[in-house]
Amino acid sequence: MKSGHLTDIEIQAYVLDEPADRQTIGQHLEECAVCRSREAEYRQLFSDLSVLPGPVSEPGLEEELLRRLSAGRPRRSQDILLPFLTGMLAIAGGTAIYACRWYIRNLFAYLSGGYILPSLAAAVLFLAGSVFFMLKKHRREVDMLNLLIR
Amino acid sequence: MNETTENRLLTKVLIEKILGGDTRAFGSIVRETEKLVRQIVFKMVDNAEDRRDLVQDVYFKVFQNLSGFKFQSKLPTWVGRIAYNTCVNHLSKKKLTLFSDLSDPDGEEDVHPGLQQTLDGRSPNKEEQALDEKERLAILQAEIGRLSPLHRTLIFLYHQDEMSYQEIGQITGLPDGTVKSYLFRARKALREAISKKYDKEEL
């Protein structure tokens, strides 16, 4: 048997079924009316806490919120990131072209106009195709997830 | 597919829908988390008008930051954390106290004065029997009202919403051990206050 009285920590842990030396505590409780009384107080307290009425739900909150929220869709991280990155890329590209203007002029001096236009067209087509397939793949994934939620 | 993975997928679909512009889908997040948000706001803030505005503020923040949800916790826990932080900011703006010390320096029990004497003449549960449940709950409500907003919130999250120490820690940003320690002190303070009240009524 434990000498002296049990601590509140021990009694709380015992009542809440948390890790504790349950055998020693249980034995002490059997023999000590003071600690048994505190144990009973805790049991009553925890039981009362679980039945206290919670805050009442406010009728119409959902409707009001949805009405106000429908004015604007939530921010996506891309909403901020994409314009920022595009802007940075444009500035960096512009600066690079300006800095290398002599080199670029010399580079294109060896190429006739007949090569430049098809090369540009191929690059643009490649980029557009990549974006198209990326969006298609994303759409397919969302549709699959939608099927799961039904 | 286990339950966690399925829940995660459902949440992901829901978020995709909302981010895709389906605002009505946000209603299911409100329905799922409203009790928790109210629990936090109502326990941390006393003013009724402020509470109403805060509940709406919480959901605006959730809506605006939905793309920032990284599935590191359950969605309701994440919403709970936003609610908690919104209330902490509100209390701080109003210069109100979030936390008051219920310190128990040596962590040791203190047997309530006179308890040993009274135990000799009657059964241990006599005090409880003397008051009916309604009175008991009213006393408990009043004593909870005397706790700090933080202690009140912890008590309700644990004992009413049946959240674990870890989940409460995720909402409040406190380490699990601190949550446990604050809860211990709050319960002890409640037990002692109620016990004293019973003694006074007995006299």
Image (cartoon, rainbow, N blue to C red):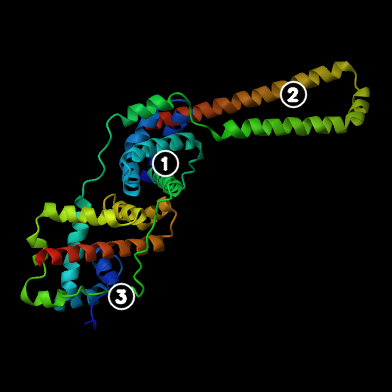
Assign a secondary structure to mark 3.
loop
Q: Nearer the viewer, residue B94 or A78?
A: B94
Query: Mark 3, chain letter?
Result: B
The answer to whether tags 1 and 2 share a subunit is no
Task: Measure the C-alpha gap from mark 2 to mark 3.
Answer: 76 Å
Q: Of the residues shown, which amino acid type is indicated by label 2?
A: Ala
The label shown at residue B108 is 3
Query: Mark 2, chain letter?
Result: A
Per the image, the residue denoted by label 2 is: A123
Task: Answer whether residue B2 is visible to the viewer in this image.
Answer: no
> In the figure, is residue A10 to the left or right of B125?
right
- Indicate which label's residue lies in the foreground, 1 or 3: 3
Residue B38 at x, y percent in the picture: 32, 42
User: Does the residue at mark 1 contact the one at mark 3 (Cβ under 8 Å)?
Assistant: no
> In the figure, is residue B55 to the left or right of B140?
right
Dividing the picture into quarters, in which one does residue B124 lie? bottom left
Dividing the picture into quarters, in which one does residue A114 lie? top right
* First of labels 1, 3 by sequence position: 1
User: Mark 1 Cα within 10 Å, few/some/many (few <14, many 20+)?
Assistant: some
Assign a secondary structure to mark 1.
helix
User: Mark 2 Cα within 10 Å, few/some/many (few <14, many 20+)?
Assistant: few
Per the image, the residue denoted by label 1 is: B8
Q: Is residue A58 above or below residue B187?
A: above
Quadrant for the C terminus of chain A, please.
top left
The answer to whether tags 1 and 3 share a subunit is yes
Q: Nearer the viewer, residue A125 or B27?
A: B27
Q: Is residue A36 above or below residue A68?
A: below
